[in-house]
């Protein structure tokens, strides 16, 4: 890290995962809402998807670790050199990636064998996110105000994401909680890109004054704008998914599903209003 | 903002919404308690009320945004001017209003179409309140002690309100939680008025010494008095609503409801004592 | 306040209430455990007890307010005098007592009429305790280290007590939560007495050095000892109550209850182990 | 304390308890999963195990107290000497051990008599852990940066462990929560050993520079590595236990259990996916 690419890479990873989780959860929820009958067929498919998700997470984590250790003057797996810790910040990042990798491995093991309980993978996710928060909190010693602040915002996001992941683990199958977590992961991803642009502006752009209180105040607002965009994006995806599933199902089994939908809607409105 | 009217306007908005939510929740709860039979008739009415609520929130948010941007030397939608951020505080307020507007839009969409889950609007409310807290927290750099303190009190209130709104989202249909949230929104509203009077005293009144510890200690107590008044007000509304619904229902269906009420009361006392 | 008696009085109030709540909850729980048959008879009794509890709380609050305002040079209901706030600390204490009085009134109204939901009194208790925390937090400006520290410990206790009271409000009828809250109220009571002895030692005793770190470290430990004593006391009361109810019931209906008890015990061990 | 052995002893205690709890919970969970039929036979055994657990905890606490008070120049039960508190840090440690002893006693009483509710022992555990956190928080006045930091990490761990223990008390019988708590206790244990090596390096090893920010950053990462190792260890124990119970049960009642397992797996996947 300590470079544009070092912030853009994890940002891209988080955006990809956040986007994928959002889409998966919305599709699952919408599909479940419209068809309660043919739900059981997709069991094996879902299980396979979870396994592939785990594999992708592991690959991302390994990429990140490799990038931190060997590219652009990383520590190259040497922890202690010349009487002091060797590139401790690079090792911090390695540790963060490692915990996400551990989550991926857990997910693969959970869904291939039946040895571990399924919700363990969610617990490991909360764990990985909390470790990330903890390391970010001990990461920015002696830097400039705005630099510290943008990393603080990252650790606020991850604190919230970790808490939500933990709540998901306690109360299973709440779609909205899963969406909240996905949105926070997306926020983290886009914010990593923002940090990259603020701390390491590409050539041709003006550098930011890292000790200007005005910049800090702008960035705190900018952070909210990121979240507003993400929330609206998720809303659009939800509406699209709803429309897509509805129109596709109408072709297949018009009369029958229509009947079911009518019943569902009534039940829901009774529950929720 | 930065003026009496800039604090009185959001104060008025919050008082209106808080008062409306209080009344709505109390009436819903009292009505439900006394008549379990004719409850289903009011479904469509409730749905329509929620939609109108959303519309009002959107109008309030737009009013607030317009006021912040164009009245009394606001930034007029220009973010960056002459090498520095243009009126960043005005933009902060705009952002806060925007998130409340987003909540209003979500509520309208949730209750007109069936595309989004109904409890999403509650989640967006928690979200808007947390964003408000976050921005207030990064808002008062370099001001005087009492100025910072009165804004801190606002962010304490919003933190509590946000947490309660989130709890409502998790545990649906708990009337008392809804009342707690309404009371905190009311508190926020009256406190905005108090802040207006403290920071921008109307002509003819003495100005407050913003660095006097005595004033800080008085205001911390005053904050509690606001809440005490609100709690007592809600108690009175509850009693009035109870008496009103009871006396109106007695006219309609004396014998039948009396029987139901008797059963209900017993069930409740068994549950709650 | 600002005197030995000013700390001893609320201490005594909290000890009395804590002791009473402990005893009530333990008796209720033990009685319920041993006899599930004759439980319904005690409904009216319980209701009457709650009302009297409310009356006692109101009397305590009024005593406290009167003491703060009129005895030993209090503000005598004058808020602003000679261009500054009049005895703001006395007003702080008055505010605290007032919120506890409000809780008492709510409890009386809840249990005499059926206009308000019963769990409102628990919510008002959480509210009163949080207000106390908030005021203590803004109360000790410019004092010496140990003085600040002993008040901080009070506000830690009340934070915990407030959270537990709020949890009680959400999850009704958990005996152990009620005992935790009672124990924290007792802790607060005994700690008020400790504070009285530390800050205003009776004549003939050495005064404490309020800026000695050793004293601070001792008091933090002493605080734990208070809690240990309280926990052990509650354990003893529980065992006594259990033995008492058991032996009294044995006389009344030996064979029948014995049978019930046997069934209960099995059910419990299945649930809890 | 203040010595290598003074940190290694509690470390060993926590590692032993953490390891034991992990194994017990995993075996209980795996056993329950594979055989729902023969479960009831083990009731008495479980009860006896809990009692012995209590006895071991009491013995550990007494050992710790004795060590603190009488070995290596401890306070020898004298609290006040020569006008000042006598070895206040030793008394702090005594207090911590005492609360764990109290937990042990509670557990013995809960499981031998039926006077106290069973979940009280879990509450007392949360209590003991919170007291430990509180004392550590008031323990490190005036020490060097790294020294303070490693104790802070201990109190973070215990805060988390206390919260999880409290959640266990509220939501009974969640195996994964019990494993989280066990893992945090193990983390505490191994971290005590790490602290011993950092603050009191054995002869022949270099001493650590306690005011070097590099060391602090390394230790914050090292803390995460400890946790990663523990999580992986627990994973391995889980897999081993699963394999062991499966293979042993296969011998006893092949066809019957196979059938049950098939049903269980389906139910689970329906619940959790």
Image: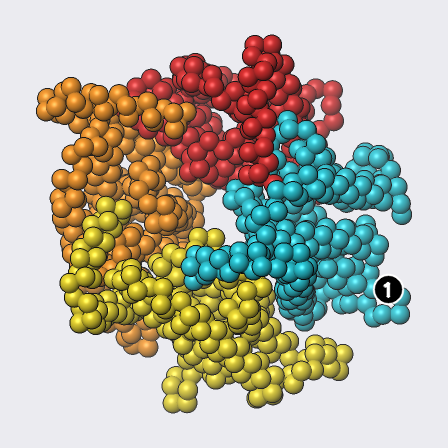
Chain colours: A yellow, B orange, C red, D cyan
Q: Is residue C177 depicted above or below A226 in this figure?
A: above
Total numbered badges shown on the rendered structure: 1
Tell me the element at label 1.
loop
Q: Is residue C140 depicted above or below D235 in this figure?
A: above
Residue C20 at x, y percent in the picture? 54, 20
Residue D36 appears in the rendering: yes
According to the picture, the residue beneath numbered tag 1 turns out to be: D202
Say left or right for C35 vs C43.
right
Residue A69 at x, y percent in the picture? 61, 83
Residue D94 appears in the rendering: no
Quadrant position of the N terminus of chain A in the picture: bottom right
Q: Residues within 10 Å of mark 1 (few under 14, many from 20)?
A: few
| Residue at image location 30% in from the left, 64% down from the top | A38
Quadrant assignment, res D120: top right
> Residue most toward the top?
C251
> Residue most toward the left?
B252
Q: Chain of mark 1?
A: D
Quadrant assignment, res A141: bottom right
Say left or right for D137 vs B93.
right
Residue placed most toward the observer, C223 or A123: A123
| Residue at image location 37% in from the left, 73% down from the top | A19
| Residue at image location 59% in from the left, 20% down from the top | C258
Quadrant assignment, res B59: bottom left
Residue C106 at x, y percent in the picture? 36, 24
Residue placed most toward the observer, A55 or C19: A55
Residue B85 at x, y percent in the picture? 32, 71
| Residue at image location 14% in from the left, 20% down from the top | B254
Q: Is residue B210 depicted above or below C254 in this figure?
A: below
Residue placed most toward the observer, A174 or B141: A174
Residue placed most toward the observer, C254 or D166: C254
């Amino acid at each position: 890290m300590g470079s544009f690419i070092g912030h853009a890479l994890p940002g891209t990873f988080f955006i990809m995962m956040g986007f994928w989780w959002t889409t998966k959860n919305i599709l699952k929820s919408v599909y479940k809402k419209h068809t309660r009958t043919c739900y059981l067929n997709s069991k094996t498919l879902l299980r396979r998807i979870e396994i592939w998700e785990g594999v992708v997470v592991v690959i991302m984590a390994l990429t990140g670790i490799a990038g931190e250790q060997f590219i652009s003057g990383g520590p190259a797996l040497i922890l202690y050199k010349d009487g002091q810790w060797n590139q401790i910040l690079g090792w911090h990042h390695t540790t963060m990636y490692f915990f996400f990798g551990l989550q991926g491995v857990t997910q693969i093991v959970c869904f291939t064998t039946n040895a571990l309980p399924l919700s363990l993978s969610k617990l490991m996710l909360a764990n990985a996110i909390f470790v990330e928060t903890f390391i970010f909190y001990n990461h920015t010693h002696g830097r400039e105000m705005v630099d510290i602040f943008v990393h603080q915002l990252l650790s606020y996001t991850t604190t919230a994401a970790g808490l939500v992941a933990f709540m998901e683990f306690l109360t299973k199958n709440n779609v909205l909680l899963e969406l909240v977590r996905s949105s926070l992961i997306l926020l983290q991803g886009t914010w990593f890109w923002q940090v990259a642009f603020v701390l390491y502006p590409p050539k041709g752009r003006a550098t930011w004054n890292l000790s200007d209180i005005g910049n800090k105040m702008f960035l705190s607002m900018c952070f909210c704008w990121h979240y507003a965009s993400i929330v609206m994006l998720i809303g659009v995806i939800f509406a699209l998914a709803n429309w897509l599933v509805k129109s596709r199902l109408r072709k297949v089994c018009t009369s029958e599903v229509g009947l079911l939908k009518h019943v569902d809607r009534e039940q829901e409105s009774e529950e929720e209003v």
